[in-house]
Image (spheres, rainbow, N blue to C red):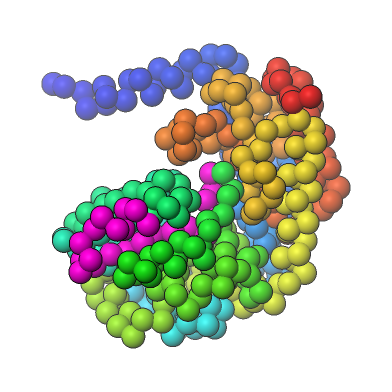
Amino acid sequence: MADLFDKFDPIIAEKAALLATGVNDPFNLVMEQVHSPTEATVNGRETILVGTYNYMGMTFDPDVIAAGKEALDRYGAGTTGSRVLNGTYQGHRDVEEALKDFYGTDHAMVFSTGYQANLGLMATMAARGEYIILDADSHASIYDGCAMGNADIVRFRHNSVEDLDKRLGRLPAEAGKLVVLEGVYSMLGDIAPLKEMVAVAKKHGAMTVVDEAHGMGFFGPNGRGVYEAAGVEADVDFVVGTFSKSVGTVGGFVVSNHPKFEVLRLVCRPYVFTASLPPSVVATAATSIRKLKHAESKRQHLWENSRKLHGGLKTKGFTIATETAESAIIAVLMPGQEACARMWSALIELGIYVNMARPPATPAGMFLLRCSLCAEHTAEQVDIIIARFVQAAGIAGIPLNA
Ligand code: PMP
């Protein structure tokens, strides 16, 4: 009998070889105790968290926690059903109202994860004979949604307005087209030139979706995302988002002003064929979203933290993926897989948790230590993070720029 696992042998061997060098496993970490949005006990050690996407620190907000507890008591642990059957409770409606208010849109549809929101939108909105045009660095959920649907897929060079224009120009003028963009690209922490991109999409008669997973909460005057900051709200057809980052819980959504939007509740398979979010989760999300609308001082502090970390690491000689802090993600480039794992391992032993990212998640085969800042980090914590990076580079033998 052929063992279907044999095809994974190269991955098993690669992991074994890496661990044989004596590093901690970057993909098998347990948060033994989480104390706050920025601190946890990891491997028995007090650790500063700098890789959680918990941008606005809402996971421990007292109002958010109280709302979740109350919903758990009143409505029970789960809905045990799809949104289109028994799984829509008052709380699901409430969180959709909170989203409509936050985004100023006519419609909002909540999914069980952001991954499913992208799966659903890509697989449903563009059918056979239609086109999805996506940035080459798009998130896995966007690619997977494309693979699930029947549209023709066209990729353009990351953040290249010119390449988007060229590729759109080659497609049949009358065919349905959906251009998929992200406000912040999560691997390098760079932002998209949305004003130019959306104008090009419109010129070619394409509809547009912007995934604001990493922009919600702190870009734009109302925290809606990069598309708000870029002033293109009126020209974007769909915004996708998640509750798993700034909102501080789990879930996903799509908002839109399109008059026919509600039909998606009947035809979108990742919405229909899965159980809805537990009542406690939608209650925490609704409370968090309402608070995020008025979180100006948090937004400001998050930007200060992001600039401080970027500037500090750059001054110490680290190579950062972006010239300046374009978002709250600061991606530090490492010379290779082993060096990256050594550095990650040294950092965790010094009480700093960051994300290690490697191909295929990263573009162009890069090895990255990705930091994501939180509005709740203090300036003192950011100083500690910078100092530990320098210390870890010494331990791991990572050369720093003079
Ligand atoms: N879109 C982007 C750009 C993401 O980075 C992520 C998660 N990392 C998602 C969608 C999926 O979000 P969720 O965690 O809610 O599934």
Question: Can residue 139 be spotted in the picture?
Answer: no
The location of residue 356, given as percent across then percent down, is 57, 35
- For the residue pair 273 and 252, the one nearer the viewer reads as 252
- Which image quadrant is residue 327 in? bottom right
In this rendering, is residue 174 above or below 400? below
Q: In which quarter of the image is the C terminus?
A: top right
Q: Quadrant of the N terminus?
A: top left
Q: How many labels does the image show?
A: 0
Residue 66 as seen in the image, left or right of residue 71: right
Residue 86 as seen in the image, left or right of residue 76: left
What is the residue that sits farthest to the right in this orientation? Answer: 380
Residue under the image location 22 percent in, 27 percent down: 4
Q: Is residue 95 magenta?
A: no
- For the residue pair 188 and 92, the one nearer the viewer reads as 188
Residue under the image location 42 percent in, 35 percent down: 360
Residue under the image location 71 percent in, 72 percent down: 295
The location of residue 251, given as percent across then percent down, is 46, 64
Q: Give the residues in magenta.
A: 165-187
The location of residue 84, given as percent across then percent down, is 29, 76
In this rendering, is residue 52 above or below 112? above
What is the residue that sits farthest to the left in this orientation? Answer: 1
In this rendering, is residue 376 above or below 401? below
- For the residue pair 292 and 237, the one nearer the viewer reads as 237
Q: Is residue 172 magenta?
A: yes
Residue under the image location 33 percent in, 74 percent down: 83
- Which image quadrant is residue 29 in? top right
The location of residue 139, given as percent across then percent down, is 43, 50
Question: Can residue 323 be spotted in the picture?
Answer: yes
Residue 104 as seen in the image, left or right of residue 298: left
